[in-house]
Amino acid sequence: MIKPIRCALLLLIVCASCTKSNETSVTPLNETVAGNDTTAVKKVMGAFVNGTYGTVSGTVSIYLQSGKYTLALENVAISNGPDLHVYLSKEIQPVNFIDLGKLKSVAGNQVYDVANMPDFAAYKYALIHCQQYNHLFGSAELK
Amino acid sequence: MSCAGQDIRLSRSIFGLQSGSMRKYLISILLLFAAIVIHAQQTSLPAINRFADITGTVGQSQGTIAAAYVYNWRIGKKKKWEAGLGLRYTGYWGVKKDFTTAPGRLSRSNTTPFLTVFAGQKTENWDTLTVQRPFVNSVNLSANASYNFSAKWSAGFNIDLIGFTFGRNTSAILTSNGITRTESVAKPASFNVLLTGDNDYGSLNSEFFLKYKLAERWSIKAVYQFYFAEYKTSTIQQRAPDGTLVNRFRNKVNAFGTAVAYHFK
């Protein structure tokens, strides 16, 4: 009578194994703000410093173009981790934040649309944050 | 009873060929035989059905495993119905699961016990707590009922009544009117009680199942599970439209699974 137990366990294992890896792509990107459109105005920028759980180097800039903000990560190199996101946050350890989405790659240049029109005097940090484990990989104060 | 019915049909075909006195004699014997068969059927099924089972379900980015001990009384002349109590452990885990506003007065248009199950959902009051790594262990007293269609097949329902929960603290993100805030230490609600529908507190499991008896002691079950998991926030709360602060959030898990049961003597 062990057979039915084995069958049930096997079925569960097969179903449970259908999960995707949560790591970020390592392929370097080379995105630019609207193809280096000269109408884009840099509003604030900052340089990344390492967080408690990871390493981040490079810079971040916020551009205003056609009434919309865009965040650009420039020449970044980020240690890989699960579920890395790009945040605009009021605090270094995020409590009140805007999630710009999952980090596209751990290297290169990449751009993210910023919804609405946040006040960068309040949202004064750009963060690379592991959302699943609430771990800060790196932060940049926007000035 | 079905055996007795076959005997009677058989006896009718024989009676057509017998005399009157012989018929009375045969009727007496067959009635006696039928009584023995019926009595034997009744006494062959013990009045108590005790079993333990292990159930596993898998859903999208989440799963449960449950272990239960059930003590059922067989009810009725034919003892086809069973009802009883059990003790069940349910472990629930997931990744980045959305929990919504839990209190029934906010989530449903009617909170009358039982009727609330059919009440409309007040989604305008719902905020979402995305629990990053939920892991909930609940131990509850359960009510169980089933019907034995035959010696091999049965179907039934069970539901948790009251118990307690322990589990992992984890970070969560509360999304309220488009604003996101991080809750660093969301905790599983520790007390569970069935009050029907969204009036419930805590983490409670319920199952519809179809059971097939493989052998005297072993059965397998196909299970549809409906599980309430509840997390509470500690540092960040939803401000509901009525001005109250809410720190209870619920995930309603619908999942299919399988189970193995062992029947005790």
Image (spheres, coloured by chain):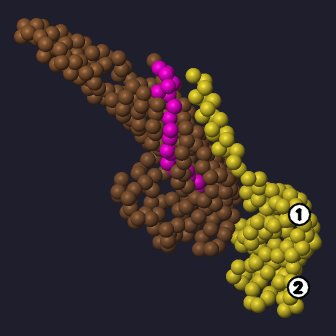
Where are the magenta residues, as a range? B213-236
Q: Position of residue B147 (x, y in %)?
A: 36, 34
User: Chain drawn brown, letter?
Assistant: B
Residue A115: which quarter of the image?
bottom right
Which amino acid, mark 2? Asn
Q: Which residue is mark 2?
A: A36
Numbered disc 2: secondary structure:
loop
Report x, y in % for residue B261. Answer: 52, 29
Q: Are marks 1 and 2 on the same chain?
A: yes
Is residue B221 covered in magenta?
yes
Amino acid on which disc 1 is placed: Thr
Residue B238 against residue B97 in the figure, above or below = below
Would you say the magenta stretch is mainly helix, strand or loop?
strand
What's the residue at 37%, 20% (across, down)? B46
- Look at the image and tell me whether residue B245 can be seen: no
Mark 1–mark 2 Cα distance, whole angstroms, equals: 21 Å
- Seen at 33% across and 32% down, the residue is B81
Name the residue tied to disc 1: A27
